[in-house]
Amino acid sequence: MAKGMKRSTKKTKTRAPKTVFKHGDSSPATPKPRRSRKVGNAGPKLEGLAKSVVDMARREQDPAIGIPTRALSNVRFNEKTRHVEMGDNKQSRSFFNFGQSKRFMQTLLVGSKCKDLIEMGKTASIRQIYYLSKHTIKGTNEKTFDDQAESDPIIEDLEVAIDALREELHVFASNRGNMAGYITLVDAGSTLDCTAMGSAGYAVPSICEPDVIQFKKCDAKFILHVEKDTVWRRFHEDRFWQKHKCIISHGGGQPARGMRRLLRRMHEELGLPVFVLLDNDPWGYYIYSVIKHGSINLAYESRRMAIPDAKFIGVSSFDYERCNLSDDVKIDLDASDVKRAKQIANYPWFARKRPWQREIKKMLSNRFKMEVEAMISKDLSYLTEEYVPMKLKDKKQWLD
């Protein structure tokens, strides 16, 4: 079984590819082999950044750091890789520029704290980084940071400046998301069987890199990712993962980076198809867009987190008639919903897809949206026993 491997130049014995169920067929299909991507070392990259600043000072130049611009104007969709990515535009953050000097020093300060964490082999939350970095500058009344809203973007600046994940900088966020099903993994040295993790399942951590989490065994055929904890609990209680030999996960709304990273790793390293079940509203469409193609705000992370082959199986705007639902499940669209839906329809990765244009047009013509829980109006277990199994079998209902 595939593990959280690093690339190696050494020759190894060829292993049989993992067998994955192909929905709608009577026989299993072998997925195309996937290659894991070796993640760079953030420590030397931070050292390189510091060295470049020192070298500029020694040459009596204005010390500066080049930060790729994190804005919609510097984001593009790569048709080949099928994910959003950051463009080449950069902004220079220099020491002798009065308007930039504080941010310049804050960037180096946070970088030094991250370097300390790496050398100690410890991790810290983004909140803890704020307190580690905050102090009053000697001889002044000036503080390095006035509040956390100043320090959080600096961490993202460092990520793009040295091309490293926040998690590689040993910085984590709160855990958000759970998982259950046919996978056994090793988390920080502890072997965990996700079929036996109780009612709460496995709590997905913020840092999901191969040095923390390794895949020991996987008998799952696919991953079903749902939007909310409450929906996930319905699937877990009904033992959906056991009946369909799969993994079920949720991200508590828009999935946090740890959840997205783990989904990407399971898809890439284990060859597991990813199916996404979300609310029938603009927010649900956006969450799918983030899972599939990456986030506009975090475009620099897309190549490590996006899953271009993920499939949207519902809830669809056509399901109201298809499933003979009652008027009680309708939630009126408001002006912001309409505006957001039109924005999403114009995303380059949706604009040229006729099925998605039909889907969004249908929701707008319906003039209402629906939650996944709408299916429970028919029966408590209709969602897990009829609706999703029907969707998994009928590829014509999938949205790509």
Image (cartoon, rainbow, N blue to C red):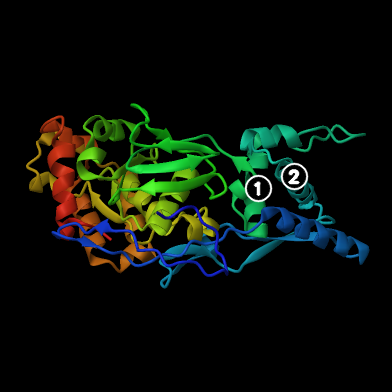
Identify the element where label 1 is drawn. Answer: helix
Q: Report which quarter residue 253 is drawn in.
A: top left
Percent coordinates x, y for residue 207 in the rendering? 54, 43
The image quadrant that residue 229 belongs to is top left
Q: Answer few, some or many: residues within 10 Å of disc 2's Cα (few below 14, many 20 plus, some between 14 and 19).
A: few
Query: At 67% across and 54% down in the image, what residue appears?
Result: 42
Give percent across and percent down for residue 359. Answer: 22, 56
Q: Residue at x 67, y 41 (%)?
A: 151
| Quadrant in which residue 300 is drawn | bottom right
Instruction: Determine the CA span between mark 2 and mark 1.
Output: 10 Å
Tell me: residue 57, above or below residue 378.
Answer: below
Query: At 44% from the left edge and 44% from the top edge, which residue is drawn?
Result: 259
Q: Residue furthest front?
A: 13
Left or right of 385 on screen, residue 205: right
Indicate whether 231 appears above or below 160: above
Which of 117/217 is in front? 217
Local SS, label 2: helix
> Does the image show residue 254?
no
The residue identified by callout 2 is 119
Judge from the rendering whether residue 83 lies leftward or rightward of residue 125; answer left or right. Answer: left
